[in-house]
Amino acid sequence: MGNRATRFSGGIEIGIIYNERDGQYACRLVIPGEQSVFQVVGEPAILEVAVDTPEAFDSVAHAALSFADDERRWGIEEHAAFSEYGWHIGRTKEERWPCSRQ
């Protein structure tokens, strides 16, 4: 199947699986106890790191939040952590920031 990672932003958990066959990342964004959405993110046009590195998964989590917010109008900003640099992505629950709207 591929490599897996989990990332966190505010109250959102982002499960990511990289599929080597088609070069895409399958992402499930979950707000525990409320709802979830599935989002597919393709490989970046220019790869600066390997597709299965922690940095690549960080970038994919950021893109998945952006796509879910823009294309699906999912209301991400009410549940995710945001800074002046964009969505904050934590690699563990301890590294996630609180929701930006709290």
Image (spheres, grey):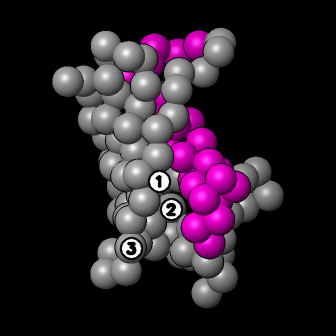
Which quadrant of the structure image shows residue 63?
A: top right
Residue 81 screen position, x and y as percent? 60, 67
Secondary structure category for the residue under label 3: strand
Residue sitting at 44 percent across and 66 percent down? 12
Q: Main secondary structure of the magenta part?
A: helix
- Earlier in the chain: of badge 3 and badge 2, it is 2
Which type of secondary structure does the marked residue at label 1 adopt?
A: loop
Q: CA distance from mark 1 to mark 3?
A: 20 Å
Looking at this view, name the residue that lies furthest to the left.
1
Query: What number is the disc on residue 9?
Result: 2
Question: Which numbered marker is on residue 35?
Answer: 3
Q: Amino acid at mark 3?
A: Gln
- Badges 1 and 2: C-beta atoms under 8 Å apart? yes
Instruction: Check contact, mark 3 vs mark 2: CB within 8 A.
Output: no
**Quick check: 6 left or right of 54?**
left
Task: Tell me where the magenta segment starts and ends, as one range.
Answer: 47-76
Question: Cα distance, mark 1 to mark 2?
Answer: 6 Å
The answer for how far apart the CA atoms under marks 3 and 2 are is 15 Å
Q: Which residue is mark 1?
A: 90
**Three-letter amino acid code at disc 2?**
Ser
